[in-house]
Image: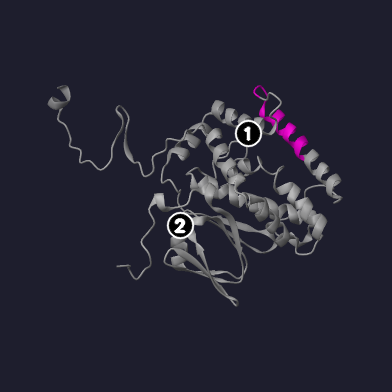
């Protein structure tokens, strides 16, 4: 019999894989609740049902009222939540990793904590952006300069292609409305990309805060990861939407453009592949595997009652 609290919690193998999910869903001026294994969204038009295990990112805009039961379901199903404030200010929250494994997190912490391996991962990221060049001997300063020149060229190329005037990137967290239309569009596009990156990173069990290029922020690794895709997705879409719509609801139009670009799911498959490549993770990850750590004998079985051995037993 079903309990009064809704359907039982889904097992891991019942949840949709991150690359099979809808990329993101934006809501505003609505009440979000839960019915069984679905998130319900109610506004003046009625109620819609959202399968919780089939959405990567839920973007909650102004006027959203969400219940504790809805957040419980969202957390259990590994859906990322982005609270989207006015004027472009955003806060992030998320649920547990989908695979319930700490392998990605342990590997990420290991790589970022060693200077040599941290630089190696950073170079991997830059090599992905410069596939025809060898960056293996470049310093971080050289790589930053090279990347800065690449991004400037992307902006200028898109400006020429779309006819949208470009001067420089400007973004004021506390005054979104004062920006130019293209800068508003870039902010909205990047935030949608950050949200999708966050959902993939968290779903696979890595940490948003352990960055290899960016550091000191709880989303440092998200900024690292998103930089791999801006030239292909958020920058051209921002220029395209600005060329078509000017300053007319540009943030909304840009989010729709990003949604359409994400719709075929190819970026999700690519993100999962890229994250595994960057962290040198293979595919033989066992869900819900837990062990006890031992400094001499390696991993030991979990859920076993161990007994203390006396000195005589130790000697034998």
Which secondary structure, mark 2? helix
Q: Position of residue 151 (x, y in %)?
A: 75, 39
Q: Viewer-proximal residue, 17 or 309?
A: 17
> In which quadrant of the rendered image does the C terminus lie?
top left
Q: For the view shown, which residue lies furthest in the left direction?
A: 312
- Can you see residue 236? yes
Residue positioned 68% across, 29% down in the render: 131
Task: Tell me which segment is drawn in magenta.
Answer: 136-151
Q: Viewer-proximal residue, 180 or 41?
A: 41
Tell me whether the residue at label 2 lies in contact with that at label 1, contact meaning CB atoms closer than 8 angstroms: no
Please give left or right for residue 310 compared with residue 110 in the image.
left
> In which quadrant of the rendered image does the N terminus lie?
bottom left
Residue positioned 51% across, 31% down in the render: 280
Q: Looking at the rendered structure, which numbered label has been put on residue 65?
A: none
Task: State the separation of the CA atoms marked 2 and 1.
Answer: 30 Å
The way the protein has been coloured in the rendering is one colour
Q: Is residue 52 above or below residue 4?
A: above
> Would you name the residue on which mark 2 appears?
75
> Would you name the residue on which mark 1 appears?
125
The number of discs equals 2
């Amino acid at each position: 019999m079903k309990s009064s609290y809704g359907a039982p919690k889904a097992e891991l193998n019942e949840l949709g894989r991150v690359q099979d999910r809808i990329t993101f869903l934006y809501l505003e001026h609505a009440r979000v609740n839960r019915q069984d294994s679905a998130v319900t969204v109610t506004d003046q038009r009625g109620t819609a049902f959202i399968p919780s295990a089939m959405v990567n990112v839920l973007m909650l805009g102004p006027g959203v009222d969400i219940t504790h039961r809805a957040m419980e379901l969202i957390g259990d199903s590994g859906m990322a939540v982005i609270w989207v404030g006015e004027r472009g200010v955003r806060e992030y929250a998320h649920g547990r990793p989908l695979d319930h494994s700490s392998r990605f997190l342990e590997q990420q912490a290991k790589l970022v904590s060693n200077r040599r391996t941290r630089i190696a991962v950073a170079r991997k990221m830059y090599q992905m952006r410069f596939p025809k060049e060898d960056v293996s001997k470049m310093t971080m300063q050289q790589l930053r300069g090279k990347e800065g020149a690449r991004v400037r060229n992307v902006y200028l190329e898109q400006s020429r292609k779309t006819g949208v005037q470009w001067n420089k990137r400007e973004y004021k967290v506390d005054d979104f409305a004062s920006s130019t239309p293209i800068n508003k569009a870039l902010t909205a596009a990047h935030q949608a990309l950050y949200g999708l990156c966050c959902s993939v990173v968290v779903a696979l069990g890595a940490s948003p805060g352990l960055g290899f290029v960016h550091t000191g922020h709880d989303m440092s690794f998200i900024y690292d990861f998103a930089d791999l895709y801006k030239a292909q997705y958020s920058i051209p879409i921002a220029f395209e939407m600005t060329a078509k719509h000017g300053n007319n609801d540009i943030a909304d139009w840009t989010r729709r453009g990003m949604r359409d670009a994400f719709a075929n799911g190819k970026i999700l498959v690519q993100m999962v592949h890229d994250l595994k490549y960057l962290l040198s993770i293979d595919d033989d990850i066992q869900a819900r595997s837990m062990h006890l750590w031992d400094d001499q004998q390696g991993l030991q079985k979990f859920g076993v009652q161990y007994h203390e051995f006396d000195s005589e037993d130790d000697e034998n």
